[in-house]
Amino acid sequence: MTPTTLADVRAAAALLDGVIEHTPVEHSRALSELVGTAVHLKCENLQRAGSFKIRGAYTRLSGLTPEQRARGVVAASAGNHAQGVALAARELGIAAKVFMPVDAALPKIAATRDYGAQVELAGTSVDEALTHALAYAERAGAELIHPFDHPDVVAGQGTLGLELLDQVPDLATVVVPVGGGGLAAGIVAALAEARPSVRVVGVQAASAAAYPASLRAGRPVAARDMRTMADGIAVGLPGSVPFEILAAHGTEIVTVSEEDLSRALLLVAERAKLLVEPAGAAAVAALMAEPELFTTGPVVAVLSGGNIDPLVLMRVVRHGLASAGRFLQLHVRLSDSPGTLAELLRDVAGTGANVLDISHARTGVDLGVDEVAIDVQVETKGLEHCAAVHETLRACGYRVTSTTRTA
């Protein structure tokens, strides 16, 4: 296939005019201070259908022939692509069927249906759902809409890059989440011609990163592991279309840990007052984990999506609080006598920590006959406060045998 060009991206922008939101760019003082240069957030979490996916989906569907439109379209997705295709199909008057994994988040299923698509739950993963979508496409003659591996999709996603040039005229660095690579490839394709001096850095979850090995091998290579909270970028094999663009331009890819992702989501919520999904926080996670890599600014971190299940949000926020040192688990040995627990709790309260939970163990191979093991979970104000609590209790003579941050 012919690589996506700036002309293709500009044509997609014309198609999308009046269809998508030109999402805002917000300055982040917290990240700017951390990195040492101006950092902005591209709020694509505020896009229609909650992510950048509508850009590529609408561009792809707009290119279908009347005959293809009449036969309808089919897609497979766990969330964002499903909603993007459903909304684009509704706008263009095309029937859409979307296969989603049986454990897909209920809010994402409901949103996809609300946009007018017929949803069928099939398989336990997006790959298995895609198998069902391919079978349906062959059986019904529907056009398969791939989430990232098509030039039209890449061109549509690239319109985000053109917006950045208007919103941040002196743009120097763009940091963008990477799953299959469509968004990053579109931005690279646009900026390589329009502003070749801009550096584009892709970010993957370390536990679901196919691109680093693929770029080293010079071809798409499947990831061995796919365990990450960032399901929006959990793609096992790079698409050939975006891979060709990213490889040809030597695009840098960095990885972030699950702790990095949860801390980033928490920072965006607390400091920027924005709700994003774990995948949408990946760019911020990279800035927080290795700020020294991004000192050439202005920097824009793309918040690629905000479609998060409230139950997942609750777990990720707790994980982020733990990673930031906001919870502390104390394992303390006490004399098994009246008043010792009350004294421990008074001393913990004196440190300013808030007790959340307590458990006792009176039997254990490492406990004396007159000892009790107490596990106390407390809420703290950060890593320095955790250290202070630990130090104070040791100074009071407590045998604190282990301390771990936990959610």
Image: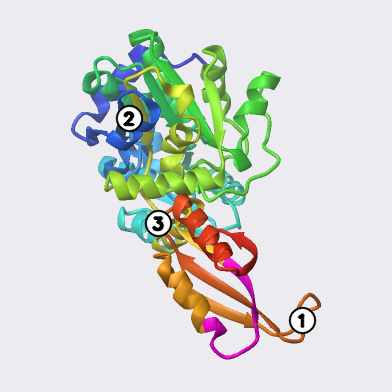
Q: Residue at x 67, y 18 (%)?
A: 218
Of circles 3 and 1, the one toward us is 1
Q: Residue at x 55, y 47 (%)?
A: 258
**N-terminal of the two: label 1 or label 2?**
2
- Which residues are the magenta region? 330-341
Q: Which residue is mark 2?
A: 32
Q: Which residue is mark 1?
A: 368
Q: Which residue is mark 3?
A: 381
- Eyeballing the image, is 279 above or below 390? above
Point out residue 399 in the picture as x, y percentages from the top left corner.
Answer: 65, 68
Residue 64 visible somewhere in the drawing: no
Alpha carbons under labels 1 and 2: distance apart:
53 Å
Point out residue 35 in the picture as x, y percentages from the top left corner.
Answer: 39, 28
Q: Is residue 268 left or right of residue 361?
A: left
Q: Circle 1 sits in a helix, a strand or a loop, which is it?
A: loop
Labels 3 and 2 touching (C-beta < 8 A)? no
